[in-house]
Image (cartoon, rainbow, N blue to C red):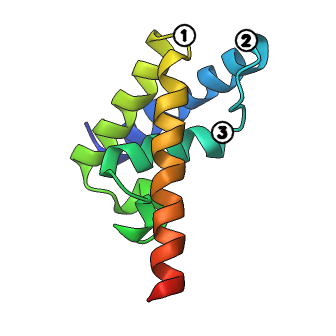
C-alpha cells in the first residue's frame, strides 16, 4: 500500500471513530487525539520524538500500518482499548516533557 493510500485509510478510520465517540460518549472525541494515540502507540513513544512532523509523511510505513492497527483495535473493541492506549500515550508524553525539562 502506498503512503497516500495508507493515510487515506487512517483518515477514514479516524472519521468513523470520531462519529462513534460522539454517539457513545467516549472521553476522546477529536480526530487529532485519535491520531496522537495511534501514532504514539505505533512507535511506543511520543511520536514526534521519533520522527519530525507530519507523522503521515515521515513515519516508516510499518509504523503507519501499526497506527492503523491501533485504530482498528479501538473500533473492534467498541472503545474498550481506548483507555489503555490513551493512558500509554499520555505517559509517553509526560516522560518526553520531563526529559525535555531535565535535559
Q: Which residue is denoted by mark 2 in the rendering?
A: 24
Q: In the rendered image, which quarter is residue 14 located in?
A: top right
Mark 2: give few (<14), some (14-19) or many (20+) Cα within 10 Å. Answer: few
Q: Residue at x 56, y 17 (%)?
A: 79
Q: Residue at x 28, y 43 (%)?
A: 2
Comparing labels 3 and 2, the label whose residue is closer to the camera:
2
Q: Quadrant of the N terminus?
A: top left
- Pointers 2 and 1 in contact (C-beta within 8 Å): yes
Query: Is residue 48 left or right of 69 when viewed as pictured?
Result: right
Q: Residue at x 40, y 59 (%)?
A: 57
Q: Position of residue 72 (x, y in %)?
A: 41, 21
Which residue appears farthest toward the left when viewing the image?
62
Q: Which residue is denoted by mark 1 in the rendering?
A: 78
Q: Quadrant of the C terminus?
A: bottom left
Q: Position of residue 58 (x, y in %)?
A: 36, 63
Question: Which comes sooner in the sequence, label 3 or label 1?
Answer: 3
At mark 2, the secondary structure is: helix
What is the number of the mark on residue 31?
Answer: 3
What is the number of the mark on residue 59?
Answer: none
Is residue 95 visible to us here?
A: yes
What is the CA distance from the residue labelled 3 to the residue labelled 1? 16 Å
Question: Which comes sooner in the sequence, label 3 or label 2?
Answer: 2
Amino acid at each position: 500500500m502506498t503512503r497516500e493510500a495508507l493515510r487515506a485509510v487512517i483518515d477514514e478510520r479516524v472519521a468513523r471513530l470520531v462519529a462513534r465517540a460522539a454517539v457513545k460518549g467516549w472521553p476522546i472525541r477529536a480526530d487529532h487525539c485519535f491520531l496522537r494515540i495511534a501514532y504514539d502507540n505505533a512507535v511506543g513513544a511520543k511520536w514526534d520524538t521519533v520522527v519530525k512532523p507530519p507523522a503521515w509523511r515521515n513515519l516508516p510505513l510499518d509504523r503507519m500500518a501499526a497506527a492503523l492497527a491501533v485504530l482498528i483495535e479501538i473500533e473492534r473493541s467498541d472503545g474498550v482499548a481506548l483507555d489503555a492506549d490513551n493512558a500509554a500515550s499520555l505517559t509517553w508524553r509526560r516522560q518526553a516533557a520531563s526529559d525535555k525539562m531535565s535535559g
